[in-house]
Image (cartoon, coloured by chain):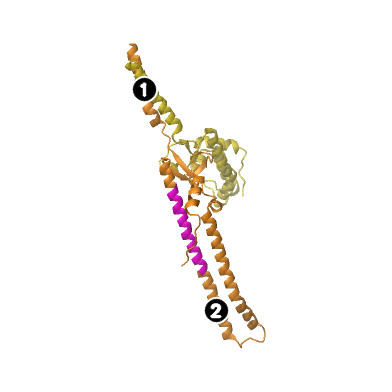
Chain colours: A yellow, B orange
Amino acid sequence: MNIQRKMILTAAFSLACSLVSVCHAGNLVLIADAAKIEALSKVVARLKVEALAAQLKKSNVGEKLNSEYAEALESSLSDLRVALPQVIESIAKIRGADVVIEPEIARKFALVGENISAEVARALDVRSAKLKFLAP
Amino acid sequence: MKGFDTMRSIWFMLLISVCLPVLAAQKSILISDTRDAFTRVSALKSLLAEVDSRIQAIQKSYELQVAPLSTELEQLRKPGQTGQNQQRKAALLLKIAALQKDASVQQQAVGAANEKALAQIDIAVVAIEAELKKERAADAVLRVQDTLYFNAACACNITEEIYKRLNARLPKLALSIK
């Protein structure tokens, strides 16, 4: 066997080893940022606008939500918040992830992973499309 | 020319084999979910039972001591007795208050001993997590409360191993009340 062939075999072997190590080592970590998900959600944005509009209609004050309307908005968003863990779970299962964590935890444990916040926000919007602001 | 191409392929394969694990570096994690520890950890079960029985004993002893005093107090409060036994009434009330305080102090002591025992279990869990992290060459041990989701069927789930080792090392835990 000439040297070149030996080198090819060695290189192929090390490539195979590295592929195996990539497949076996580590766990698939995904990152989801709850605050970012809400900021990206179109349903949340729409409900906020609806809340402001409702407040404006009633009291002529529409720049910032007062406590009564802020509470009503929170209550209207409760269904969406309940759905959030389910959406995260379904995306994680589809992706075959072992764990989904908040960015803060990822930083704490020096873990890296794909941020799925935008995907979660989109899925959440589809699921909560019919959600309406419930005026106080 | 052919030799040059082959050498280039070899170098490329070697480069890829070195870079691939670095680029696709997925850290190895372990996850522990001890939310059902109160039903799975024998030390916790025995501890809970002891706390429960001690609190009940304190309550029962208090009730037994207070019952005759309360009856006597009721008698003294009946019409016709007014003004005659004021001193006795005051003494009874003081005694009941002292018994109440004593029972409360005893319950607090049980609570403190319980906290101490729970801390012992927590220390043992942390030690087992550290052991498993070392044994499995993991980068981090996450607790379920650190996660938004975790795959319970994942090999990274060390919950059962934690319970197994904890029950072997700390099968029972008694309260140490000062």
Residue B51 lies, with reference to residue A17, above or below; the image says: below
How far across and how far down the image is residue A7, in percent? Answer: 34, 20
User: CA gap, disc 2 to disc 1?
Assistant: 90 Å
Magenta stretch: dominant secondary structure: helix
Task: Read off the residue under disc 1.
Answer: A10
* Residue appearing at x 58%, y 85% in the figure: B86
Q: Which residues are magenta?
A: B106-128
In the depicted view, which residue is nearer to us: A64 or A70? A70
**Is residue B165 visible to the viewer in this orientation of the structure?**
yes
Q: In this image, A26 relative to A6: left or right?
A: right
Q: Within 10 Å of the Cα at label 1, are there few (<14), some (14-19), or many (20+) other Cα atoms?
A: some
Picture coordinates of residue B64, whole percent (x, y): 60, 74
Badge number at residue B95? 2
Helix, strand or loop for disc 1: helix
| Chain ID at mark 1 | A
Horizontally, is A129 left or right of B24 in the view?
A: right
Image coords of residue A127 (percent x, y): 60, 37
**Does the magenta portion include B15?**
no
Point 46% across, 60% down: residue: B116
Q: Nearer the viewer, mark 2 or mark 1?
A: 1
Residue found at the very far right of the displayed protein: B79
**Label ID, residue A90:** none
Q: Amino acid at mark 2?
A: Lys
Asked which secondary structure carries label 2, the reply is: helix
